[in-house]
Image (cartoon, helix red, strand yellow):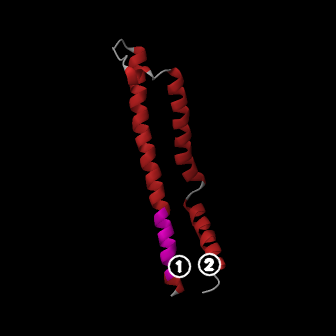
Amino acid sequence: METNSSNSSEENVLKELASKKVVKLKSFYKHTFLYLIALALYLLKEYTELPLHFIPINFLNDVVIIIWSAVYVGSAIDMFVSFRIFGHDWEERKLRSLLEKKNKTQKWE
């Protein structure tokens, strides 16, 4: 009976971790889409003679694009390099250690 409960709790924790990864990936793709639109508008504003001088686009200057690019690169590194470093094996080991701690603290059963 304990194996079923421990397996179901492990499955629940794995599902929770997977859903967090999916939410994080979805957020990263939204950020990518907005960044590419802003970058395209900035390049059009700076290097063409299109009349793109209205309120939201006026705020796209060199400093904003540089800071946004740095934040984007940082989030990309966090998204993809952390998955490489802290891969599936690391997650399983961490999950097992957390579950073992939880089982050790519940000794009244």
Density class for disc 1 (Cα within 10 Å; few <14, some 14-19, many ≥20) is few
Density class for disc 2 (Cα within 10 Å; few <14, some 14-19, many ≥20) is few
Determine which residue is flagged by label 1: 6
The image shows residue 11 at horizontal and vertical percentages of 48, 71
Quarter-of-image position of residue 77: top right
Determine which residue is flagged by label 2: 103
Left or right of residue 4: residue 56:
left
- In 3D space, how far apart are the residues under numbered discs 1 and 2 (Cα atoms)? 9 Å
The image shows residue 46 at horizontal and vertical percentages of 43, 16
- Amino acid bearing label 2: Asn
* Residue range corresponding to the magenta coloring: 5-16
- Amino acid bearing label 1: Ser
Q: Answer whether residue 8 is magenta in the image.
A: yes
The image shows residue 69 at horizontal and vertical percentages of 52, 31
The reply to whether the C-beta atoms of the residues labelled 1 and 2 are less than 8 Å apart is yes
Q: Tag 2, which secondary structure?
A: helix
Q: Say whether disc 1 or disc 2 marks the residue closer to the N-terminus.
A: 1
Q: Give the residue at x 61% y 69%.
A: 98
